[in-house]
Amino acid sequence: MASVKPYFDTRSPRKDGTCPLKLALTHKGNTVLVSLQIYLLPKCWDSRKQEVVKDKRKAVYNDALRRRLVLAENVILKLGEKGELKTLTASALKKRIEAGENPDPTPAETSRPLVRDLFLQFIDTCKIEGTKAIYRHTLERLGRFADPDTLTFEDIDASWLRRFEAAMGENNKVNTISLHLRNLRAVFNRAIDEEIIPQGMYPFRRFKIKKESTPKRSLSVEELRKLRDYPCEEWQEKWRDMFLLVFYLIGINTVDLMSLTEVRKGRVEYRRAKTHRLYSIKVEPEAQAIIDKYRGTDHLLSFADQYVDHGDFRRRMNATLKKIGPVEWVENRSRTHPKKNKKRYNALFPGLTSYWARHTWATIAASLDIPQETITAVLGHGGNTVTDIYIDFDQRKVDEANRKVIDYVNGKSTR
């Protein structure tokens, strides 16, 4: 049975500090929000009593809230009696409730949901915090360009997208702009899939999202050998070893590396934080040697015992990788530091980060003519083209591919 209740939405305050009061409609496990066009300061909403307080129009607002609640409940009751309720999605039910106030609504009156509301609903359904943060950033960029309290899907056409793109172009790179536009496109697709807006309202058929080729993010086999064998300073060695471990474990993400607790039957198994897919990686001798060198107590690696925040671990690792290379002493001209000379690090590979290990593995694997479907499955990009669960892929092919790549790096010809 569907249910409806007041919802004070504090996620995206307006410029004057007020937030919208809405109805939260829950049906078939999904929740959608119905706009009431009522905006309040947080101090004016009593969440316990579920009513407006401390506002000069509180009587009017509370009366409007009660009327809309009764209206929504009556629509739900009537649809249930007719047997229609079970055939409706939450979004379709929302339209019927909105239309319930006007028996013969025009299309314009029933198809003008705010882009902001759909963005917030989309964010609520995301399970990964990083993804939520990216979409919040896009919503923030939209708010700088247009009024989020009035911007509807009908307002956005190809011309609007070009103006939005141009506005972002003043301070952002091409791929950053592309990211925000793709996020907006994803919300449009969701709105169409849930029948909130018609397909004819989709503006991206006449607008192409630009994309810029990213700089090189992989090492050649010769460069990888150079990094592996370079006489690092002692404090740099452990971070270089972590880069190599990521490579030997087929480009494992640092968040997943930090979550490992054991090697079981010669393998590490984990569910990737980003995609929730299950992975099983054979621990080759080269990887095992590094694990033994840095073995932890509560986790597989001592780094995971030391760094609670994997982001801190990754930042320190990346900062160190950019300093591996020849060192020279230069005169220190700083007035705040009395030392005469200071070290200047000349990076072997400027821009090197942990993510390069993943690209490097894939690049070397491709150069060895390892089948594309194997590389795709290994990196977890398979989707429906291979399998949604990595561990179901032929594990022997994956193990053989990794051994072939490592042998080639070690100078053992595999061609």
Image (cartoon, helix red, strand yellow):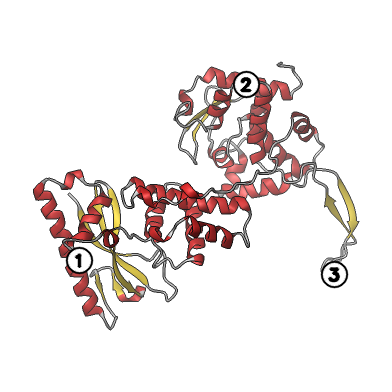
Q: Is residue 115 left or right of residue 134?
A: left
Q: Is residue 100 left or right of residue 374?
A: left
Mark 1 or mark 2, earlier in chain: 1
Residue 242 or 410: which is nearer the viewer?
410
User: Residue 41, position in %: x, y?
Assistant: 36, 75
Q: Quadrant of residue 54?
A: bottom left
Disc 1/disc 2 C-alpha distance (Å):
62 Å
- Residue type pointed to by label 1: Arg
* Label ID, residue 59: none
Judged from the image, the secondary structure of the residue bearing numbered disc 2 is loop
Image coordinates of residue 266 in percent, x first then y, are 56, 23
Q: Is residue 365 left or right of residue 278?
A: right
What residue did someone put label 3 on? 335
* Residue 284, percent from left and from top: 63, 23
Q: Quadrant of the C terminus?
A: top right
Marks 2, 3: nearer the viewer: 2
Residue wearing tag 2:
370
Q: Are marks 1 and 2 in contact (CB under 8 Å)?
A: no
Q: Along the line of sight, which residue is nearer the eye, 306 or 162?
A: 162
Query: Residue at (32%, 47%) from the top-left corner?
Result: 194
Q: Which residue is mark 1?
A: 68
Number of numbered discs overlaid on the protein picture: 3
